[in-house]
Amino acid sequence: MIIEPRTRGFICLTAHPKGCEQNILNQIDYVKSKGAIDGPKKVLVIGASTGFGLASRITSAFGANASTIGVFLEKPPKPNRPASPGWYNSAAFETQAHQAGLYAKSINGDAFSKEIKQQTIALIKKDLGQVDLVIYSLASPVRVHPETGVKHKSVLKPIGNSFSNKTVDFHTGNISQVSIEPATEEDIENTVTVMGGEDWKFWIDALQKEDLLAPEAKTVAYSYIGPKLTEPVYRKGTIGRAKDHLEATAFSITDALKNINGKAYVSVNKALVTQASSAIPVIPLYISLLYKIMKENNVHEGCIEQMQRLFADRLYSNEKLATDDQGRIRVDDWEMREDIQAKIKELWDNATTETLGTIGDLEGYSNDFFNLFGFKVAGVDYDQDVNEVVEIPGLQSL
C-alpha cells in the first residue's frame, strides 16, 4: 500500500515501515562511525521501541556488541493498516542485529504488569543468565497499577497557579497564547504513579530477587529539567513531581544493589522532539528556538547522539563518572550552556508567527516530528508501494 502521514493534532496516525527502517540504519551507521565502546554485554531495555530507549538499545548492540532484550507496547500491523512506528523500528533493529550476529529478542506488552515482568524474567533466565545493564525508558501516559488494578492517567499541569505563555502549532507555524489550569492533588498523585520511579524499582526488585543482575550491574532511567522558561508547566508542574520521584528512586535502588556493588543513575537529557514533548504547550516553541541556536553552535544532538555520548563518555568511560549535586548524569549540558539559554531568552520575546521562520527552526522541528513516524526521511521513495505487514524477527509469544 501507499502510506501517507495522517495527523490529528500532535499525533500522527500512520507510520511508514521503510522510513522507520531507514531511521534505524542511519542510527546504526552513526554509532558504528564513533567506534567501539567498552560497554555492557547483556542489556534489558524497558521502553525499547522509540526515543531514548531505542537509541540505548542501538548503542548497546552496535557500539558494544551487546545482547539485548527489548520490552515495549506497540500496535502490530494488519492488512491495509500500518503498525505503530515502534513496531517498525523494532523490526528493523532486530533484522540488522541478527544479520550482524547479535542476540536480540523482544516482548510486546504492558511493562507495568506482573505478567510481562515474569515473561521477561523467564527469557533472561533461559537465554542470558544475567544482565549487566537495565535501561528504564517508559513514556506511557497511563498505568494500570499491578497491585490495585486501578488505572492512573498522568496530566501535564502547573501546580499552585494557572500558567499562561506562548506556544506554537508546529503544523502551521501560528504562535498563540495558551493557558493551563493548576493541577489537583489527585492529578499530582496520578502523574507520580504513572511517571515516577515505583515501576522502575518494581523491575529491579523482581530481577534482583531472581539473581538476574550481574555483579556491578547498572540501571539508568531518563529525566529532563529544562530552563526557567518552561519550569512552571514542566519541572515545577505535575511531570516535574514525577521526575523528582524518579530521581529519588535511583538512591533507593542503589541502596538495594549494594550486595552486588550495583548502581542506579538518572540521566538528564536534552529537549528533543518526541510524541510526548509535542503534546506539551510551550515546549515546541522552545525546541524550535533551541534547535536553531544549537545547530548554529554545532552542538545539536538527536536521541542517538545523546545516547552514544552517554555510553561512551559517561557510563563506560575510563574517567570517574561525573554527576551533579543531586547525583544525576547531565547530558543536557550543551543545551543548558549559559550562552545558549541567554540567546533563547532574547529570541523568546521576539517570537511571533511572522518572525519564527527566521529566528527559529520550525522546519527542523516538523521534520523531526514526521521522522518519528518514518516520514520525510531522506532516501525513501514514498510513492512506492510497501508491505505494511512486517514481522519482528525475535518477538516472543506469550
Image (cartoon, rainbow, N blue to C red):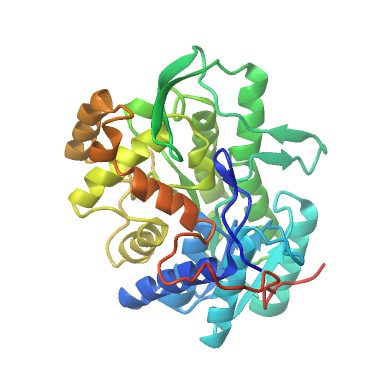
Residue 254, image x and y in percent? 51, 50
Rendered view: 232 above or below 52: above
Rendered view: 301 above or below 389: above
Q: Nearer the viewer, residue 275 or 325?
A: 275
Residue 392, image x and y in percent? 67, 73
Quadrant assignment for the N terminus: bottom right
Q: Is residue 89 at least partly visible in the picture?
A: yes
Residue 291, image x and y in percent? 30, 46
In which image quadrant can residue 349 be found?
A: top left
Q: Nearer the viewer, residue 348 or 331?
A: 348
Determine the residue positioned at 53% across, 42% down.
276
Residue 323, image x and y in percent? 33, 47
Determine the residue positioned at 60% across, 60% down.
86
Determine the residue positioned at 55% across, 68% down.
43
Left or right for 112, reference 319: right
Rendered view: 112 above or below 54: above
Number of labels in the image equals 0
Left or right for 109, reference 34: right
In which image quadrant can residue 283 be found?
A: top left
Rendered view: 387 above or below 152: below
Q: Is residue 268 at least partly visible in the picture?
A: no
